[in-house]
Image: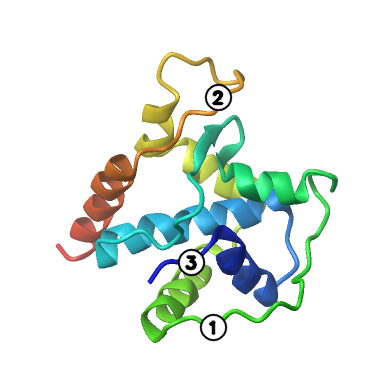
Amino acid sequence: MYYSVFDVSEWFLTKEKMCLKKLASLCYYAQAWSYVLHNEILINDTEFQAWVHGAMSPHLYERYKNYDWWDKLAPTGREVIFDKTTLELLHSVYLTYGEFSANSLECMITAEPPWINARKGYERDDSCTVAISLKDMGSFYSSICKEDFR
């Protein structure tokens, strides 16, 4: 089943108030792990681009662009119903990555091959709107799974 980036972000915001960079990072990881574990995209209305400070959904940015970068965003109160598999995935992503700060998540994402590959030809601080490839996400994150089970 597919969801919007706003459905998924709303779920994460019910767990804690957080800044846009952390929110976008959690949504990115949800997309990546859904692709690896379930062989399908979770979020069907946006792509994640290799911005300077990590993975960003342009749709998510557009919604929150009038907030300061570090403002703590809160849930809107809109209820979203997820299927059981998706809820398990979102819980796992939050348990794995939710404890990290926005800056820590930035450091993680910007050190990983999917983000690096999308930014080929760009300097570290150059503006970039290249989409992070689902294929690259699948290759990299599935290699992490294989290592965990060795």
What residue type is disc 1 on? Ile
User: Which one is earlier in the sequence, the residue at label 1 or at label 2?
Assistant: 1
Q: Mark 3 and mark 2 in contact (Cβ < 8 Å)?
A: no
Residue 24 screen position, x and y as percent? 60, 52
Disc 2 residue type?
A: Cys
- In this rendering, the answer to whether 119 lies above or below 79 is above
**CA separation, marks 3 and 1?**
10 Å
Q: Is residue 100 left or right of residue 17?
A: left
**Disc ID at residue 3:** 3
SS type, badge 2: loop
Quarter of the image holding residue 32? bottom left
Vertical position of residue 91 compared to residue 119: above or below: below
* Picture quarter with the C terminus: bottom left
Mark 1, residue position: 81
Describe the element under mark 3 as helix, strand or loop.
loop
Residue at coordinates 41% horizontally, 80% vertically from top-left?
Answer: 88
Query: In the image, is 79 to the left or to the right of 130?
Result: right
Q: Picture quarter containing residue 56? A: top right
Quadrant of image for the N terminus: bottom left
Q: Which mark is residue 128?
A: 2
- Look at the numbered disc 1 and give the secondary structure of its residue: loop
